[in-house]
Amino acid sequence: MAERKSKPNINKIFALMDVLNKDKRYNPESYSFVMSALEFTTRKLRKKGHVTGLELLVGIKEHAIEKFGPMARTVLEHWGIKTTNDFGEIVFNMIDVGILGKSDQDSKEDFNNSFDFKSTFDKGCKYTIR
């Protein structure tokens, strides 16, 4: 998933407001967190632009643990995020309104049940992506 740089920030704000009005499953903070995790991931991987869904999920996991520690799962669930599939929904909501871009190979399925929230966040353990 790649962040688009061409649109002015005000357009992104209006686009995000449209998403929040149409899909009320997720707290607005969840979108901000995913954008922060995308920046964290690209910086960590030393990439500019596109990262895969798998790369983003690894970055999301690490960023959540770094930012929220043992409260990571609690915070994410408070925002409506209970599985990795929810991250796919959030990412593709942003893709649909032009906040993020994607390659032809990217799909929501890249986020399907990639890791278990309970074992990943409650134990802060290493995990295997399926």
Image (cartoon, rainbow, N blue to C red):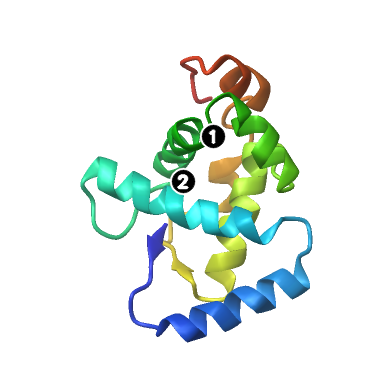
Q: Give the residue at x 76% y 66%.
A: 23
Q: Give the residue at x 58% y 71%.
A: 96
Disc 1 marks a residue whose amino acid type is Phe
Q: Give percent across and percent down for residue 41.
A: 35, 45
Would residue 2 be found to the left or right of residue 14 on screen?
A: left
The answer to whether residue 10 is above or below residue 76 is: below
Marker count (numbered): 2
Q: Earlier in the sequence, mark 1 or mark 2?
A: 2
Instruction: Determine the secondary structure under disc 2.
Output: helix
Q: State the residue lying farthest toward the left.
A: 46
Residue assigned mark 1: 68
Classify residue 7 by image quadrant: bottom left
Q: Give the residue at x 53% y 67%.
A: 95
Question: For residue 122, which numbered disc appears in the image?
Answer: none
Residue assigned mark 2: 53
Would residue 94 be found to the left or right of residue 53 on screen?
A: right
Distance CA(mark 1)–CA(mark 2):
22 Å
Classify residue 9 by image quadrant: bottom left
Would residue 94 be found to the left or right of residue 43 on screen?
A: right
Instruction: Determine the secondary structure under disc 1.
Output: helix
Q: Give the residue at x 38% y 72%.
A: 4
Disc 2 marks a residue whose amino acid type is Gly
Q: Residues within 10 Å of mark 1 (few under 14, many from 20)?
A: some
Q: Nearer the viewer, mark 1 or mark 2?
A: 1
